[in-house]
Amino acid sequence: MKDNNLLTKDGIAYIVSRILDYAVDAKSAVEKEPQNLFYQGKRLAYTEMLDVIKNELTVRGEDIKAYGLDFDIDNFKFDVQDKRRIS
């Protein structure tokens, strides 16, 4: 029996793009209210999630650029409009 629950590369890329969107929102919130601890924590959480995903993809030999993760996650230096998709 075929397991239909496996994620495809496109599925993973979609999930990463959603997390990147939320990370951008969290970054913007911190920039607007830098003293807000909730927003700081939210940004940290997305940073950690993206870091884990990036590391796991790297270990598996995936091209992180294809997933839009070829940026400095810790410093959030990326342009959300420049996200790449796997074709």
Image: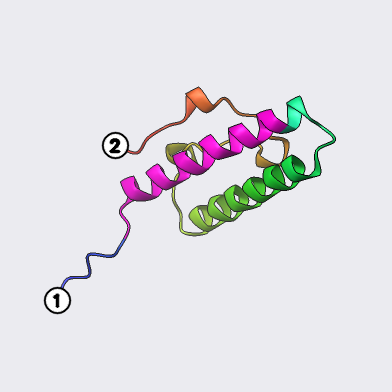
Image quarter for residue 33? top right
Q: Secondary structure at mark 1?
A: loop
Sequence-earlier tag: 2 or 1: 1
Residue 29 lies, with reference to residue 54, above or below; the image says above
Mark 1 belongs to which amino acid?
Met
Residue designated by label 2: 87
Question: Residue at (34%, 49%) from the top-left corner?
Answer: 11
Where does the image place residue 30, in percent across and percent down from the top left?
74, 33
Image quarter (top left, top right, bottom left or bottom right) of the C terminus: top left
Asked if residue 41 lies left or right of residue 25, the reply is right
Q: CA distance from mark 2 to mark 1?
A: 27 Å
- Residue 13 located within the stretch drawn in magenta: yes
Q: Label 2 crowding class (10 Å Cα cut-off): few <14, some 14-19, many 20+?
A: few
* Rendered image: mark on residue 1: 1
Colour scheme shown: rainbow
Where in the figure is residue 73, as x and y percent of width and height? 65, 40
Give the quarter of the figure containing the N terminus: bottom left
Residue at the farthest left position: 1
Query: Is 58 displayed left or right of 15 in the figure?
Result: right
Q: Residue furthest bottom?
A: 1
Left or right relative to 9: residue 84? right
The amino acid at mark 2 is Ser
Q: Is residue 35 left or right of residue 87?
A: right
Residue at 42% x, 38% y: name it. Answer: 66
Q: Which residues are magenta?
A: 7-29
